[in-house]
């Protein structure tokens, strides 16, 4: 039984399984950030999408409705997909912040500070 007031996302089983797979397969930049943040890698608060991958985000803080994405070097096609996905997540009520792999590797402290600022508190 979940605590009262705790968000509960009803993601389809397929999405839940894929999110679990991705949690086991973090990229090195995602792992570095994961070790620094009090967030959990979850399925996003999404429904009504026919594309399960649109629901899985890198990091999500339900309390703040904040999505944190870590992007690799992307071709233009991937950048268009990411932008459409960002717009979709924002339309669902989430804030979205994106960092590149390079930013996480080279400027981890600054990345963590930026996220903490959005969460309204000091860096962890």
Image: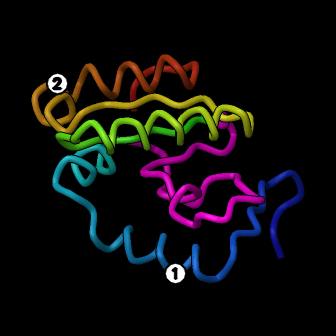
In the rendered image, residue 95, in percent from the top left (x then y), is placed at 60, 29
In the rendered image, residue 19, in percent from the top left (x then y), is placed at 48, 70
The residue at the far left in this view is 106
Quarter of the image holding residue 68?
A: top left
Q: Viewed as shown, does residue 84 lie left or right of 113?
A: right
Residue 61 is a magenta residue: yes
The boundaries of the magenta stretch are 37-65
Q: Which of 25/75 is in front?
A: 75
Quarter the N terminus occupies: bottom right
- Residue that mark 2 sits on: 107
In the rendered image, residue 55, in percent from the top left (x then y), is placed at 58, 57
Q: Viewed as shown, does residue 47 lie left or right of 72?
A: right
User: Label 1: how many residues lie within 10 Å, few (<14), some (14-19) or many (20+)?
Assistant: few
| Residue at (31% x, 31% y) in the render | 99
- Dot 1 falls on a residue whose secondary structure is helix
- Residue that mark 1 sits on: 17
Q: Viewed as shown, does residue 64 lie left or right of 17?
A: right
Quarter of the image holding residue 11?
A: bottom right
| Residue at (40% x, 41% y) in the render | 69
């Amino acid at each position: 039984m979940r605590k009262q007031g705790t968000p509960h996302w009803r993601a389809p089983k397929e999405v839940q399984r894929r999110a679990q797979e991705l949690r086991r397969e973090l990229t090195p930049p995602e792992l570095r950030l994961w070790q620094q943040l009090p967030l959990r890698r979850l399925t996003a608060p999404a429904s009504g999408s026919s594309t399960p991958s649109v629901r899985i985000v890198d990091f999500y803080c339900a309390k703040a409705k904040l999505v944190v994405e870590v992007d690799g070097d992307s071709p233009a096609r991937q950048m268009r997909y990411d932008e459409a996905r960002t717009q979709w997540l924002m339309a669902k009520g989430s804030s979205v912040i994106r960092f590149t792999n390079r930013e996480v590797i080279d400027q981890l402290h600054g990345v963590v500070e930026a996220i903490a600022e959005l969460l309204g508190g000091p860096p962890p």
